[in-house]
Amino acid sequence: MSLIHPIQAVVSNRSGELIFAVLKNVIIAYRYDQTNGKYLEMGKWEDQFSRDEMIKIAVVKEQARQLAENEEKGIKKSKTNEGNTIEKKHDAKIPVPGPGAPPIYSQIRNLMISNDETMLLACADSDKSVLVFKIETLNNDNCLKLIKRQPFPKRPNAITITEDDKTVIIADKFGDVYSMLIESPVIENIDEEFEPILGHVSMLTGVLSTTNNGMKFVMTSDRDEHIKISHFPQSYIVDKWLFGHKEFVSSICIPSWNSNILVSAGGDHGIFLWDWIKGEKLDEFDFTDLVLPYINENHLAPDRFQNEENDLKEFAVSKLVSLPNNPYFAFFVEATKLLIILEVDQSTYKMKLLQKIVLPYYITFISTFSDDKTMGFNISLDNRESGDKDFVKFIALDTTSNTFSIKEEQSDEFNTSIVNSFSKEDSIVKVELDEVYPLYNIISLKKHGEHYS
Amino acid sequence: MDLRNPNRDPNSRRVLYRTNKEENRKELKHVKIDESTLAQEGKKLDLPKKRFYRQRAHSNPFSDHQLDYPTSPDDMNWSKLFPHYYDSTTGKMTKDVTIADIGCGFGGLLIDLSPAFPEDLILGMEIRVQVTNYVEDRIIALRTNHAKDYQYQNINVIRGNAMKFLPNFFQRAQLSKMFFCFPDPHFKQRKHKARIITNTLLSEYAYVLKDNGVIYTITDVEDLHNWMVKHLEEHPLFERYDKEWEDNDKCVQIMRNATEEGKKVERKKGDKFVACFRRLPNPAIV
Ligand SMILES: C[S@@+](CC[C@H](N)C(=O)[O-])C[C@H]1O[C@@H](n2cnc3c(N)ncnc32)[C@H](O)[C@@H]1O
């Protein structure tokens, strides 16, 4: 029996009224209607860029490059008996995946809303591009209008937008960081024309931009335990590194209630809180004991790193977020049902557990909403076993009791809308159980030092 | 014998040699060598033989090797590498490393720089294990054989990937000189990101260099030379020194002939292209 693909990412505007979710290679938008408590579908966008097309472009390009290289080296072209050079003219061959080849997943990643809430940003795996949508709230047919699609040389792993909403900063899988003006035209020849503004020789996992004391900075995190802070736009001046992680970093954030603070997490079993201006670690919150009861067979280390007892478990923080106006952080460990909310003491900068919330399924994503009326978290779940229920849970703060709780009714309304949007059998996001995209990739960042020489 | 990996044959001469040297290294690497050591042992150490340390020419700078590196420069224990400059009463080093030879290979430059800069601590960084072992053994032998006048106490080598972990070892503005001698050329266009001098890496090198510190480059590959010059000239924090400066600088003289690669090029009568750059002060932050 087929199911609607679980949601990989969900974000909302500050009020929580506009919601965007990713299912497979589709982005869908809803608006919450205060009057009847229902979610109305506002728009949908499917990445139709064919992977074959991509590969074809790459193959043609590579052939041209090799030809040019050979020419340079003066390698003679093959000649016919009459001495004419043979022009190779056959079409570029597209490599066909052989039997047993891993399936290709063209995900949409890095969903985020601009500061002024007029744009939605995302990245498409298919052509390694950054997507910029204008959010046309008055367009009843489809509020998502693609205004820019800029491919990059390597897959963008993380993006952020500057405070003025003019520039997107992109951190890629191979360690390069690019800056792209939203207004500028699309660059066709990315390899030649795009120069990185800074880089790590490592896979990048996070990027932030912030202003402090009139100066702008870019923070980048990587698989080699590094968090680097560079000036912006003078990104060739490194301000400092924040040293302390012993495992990869997967998630970094700067709370808007104190822009001197940076919080980071990843393969270490602690949340790190830094004064990044001073370059000092102020606190580390060890979550091992909290999380251990939720660690399961999905966390068994891969065979080649497994121990003899076959019980080595590896786990890591998938995502960490901070509420903009209150000293609260929330995070989850990949492939667990547990959401952990921490509170930071604003005079001592020590973190303590505020609340644990157990969700019905493993968490796949977390984001925040917060305005003067309400605040909390948008959570998506790996609901593949649920029979098309429980796609998301909204969690909001009750200010009188100062506790967070799941807004069940509202969440159910949203789930109903998802089912209404995608229930048709031929819907693009309908899949069989074994076709669900891989949702747990973070732990694969863990290094095992497998290269000895 | 395991044909794919001759090193696995436990009786091969290379393995026996390496095991023997490794024991030696473990014992001598971190001890303070002085006259008493010499008197005690009463004999000289043979210099290591290069042929026993052969290794594949390239190591991928992108993959995650089994590397040992400090979590931060504050955690680096320099006393083990430079025991002679460790003050046991204060528990502190009396000097910091100020000169780095990046991709030092078999260590020829370190050995020639040692007497030329007696007041500096000089560190070679090399990614290949066996090559690093060779340099370690070479320095142990030299220190032992010159224990009487404490020679070669100011140089040492570390196995590390300079493209990833340089900032784990050095503080901001700690270095006054960095050498890039005959770096791997990575000819193919697609592999240019693997080169040890790129726009983005230069910003990290600038961070560990102090104002007016120097980057030295030398290569026999003209393409690579042009490429390094282009990227260094484009970088806002570096400015090239002119020919006259090069001709009067003692490091340039040493670097031309000290390294193993340099000697090879000399034998083949190849060209050597030199370019040196000054670390400019940071401009005002906008
Ligand atoms: C061609 S050799 C030159 C060695 C020496 N400088 C000389 O002139 O004889 C380049 C050396 O750089 C080392 N190397 C390459 N990438 C490196 C990296 N990322 N970190 C440290 N060493 C590296 C290689 O292993 C090799 O030994």
Image (spheres, coloured by chain):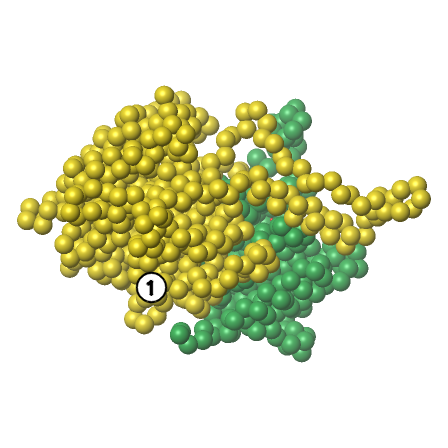
Chain colours: A yellow, B green
Question: Residue A410 at x, y = what percent?
Answer: 18, 40
Question: Residue B159 at x, y = what percent?
Answer: 52, 48
Residue at the right extreme of this rendering: A82
| B261 to B10, vertically: above or below | below
Question: Residue A313 at x, y = what percent?
Answer: 34, 30
What is the count of numbered marks?
1
The quadrant of the picture occupied by the C terminus of chain A is: top right
Chain letter of disc 1 in the image: A
Q: Is residue B234 left or right of residue B266?
A: left
Residue with the mark numbered 1? A163
Q: Is residue B208 visible?
A: no
Please report the residue visible at 40 percent of the width from the left and 25 percent of the height from the top: A432
- Label 1 CB less than 8 angstroms from ligand 1: no
Please report the residue visible at 57 percent of the width from the left and 43 percent of the height from the top: A54
Type of amino acid under label 1 = Glu
What is the crowding at mark 1: few (fewer than 14 residues within 10 Å), some, or many (at least 20)? some
Q: Is residue A100 visible?
A: yes
Q: Nearer the viewer, residue A259 or A386?
A: A386
The quadrant of the picture occupied by the N terminus of chain A is: top left
Please report the residue visible at 67 percent of the width from the left and 37 percent of the height from the top: A93
Q: Nearer the viewer, residue A329 or B7?
A: A329
Q: Nearer the viewer, residue B96 or A189?
A: A189
Please report the residue visible at 68 percent of the width from the left and 76 percent of the height from the top: B243
Which image quadrant is residue B52 in?
Answer: top right
| A163 to B31, vertically: above or below | below
Q: Is residue A32 left or right of residue A149?
A: left
Question: Residue B30 at x, y = what percent?
Answer: 46, 48
Residue at the bottom extreme of this rendering: B244
Helix, strand or loop under label 1: loop
Q: Nearer the viewer, residue A166 or B83?
A: A166
Q: Is residue B166 left or right of residue A241?
A: right
Which image quadrant is residue A440 in?
Answer: top left
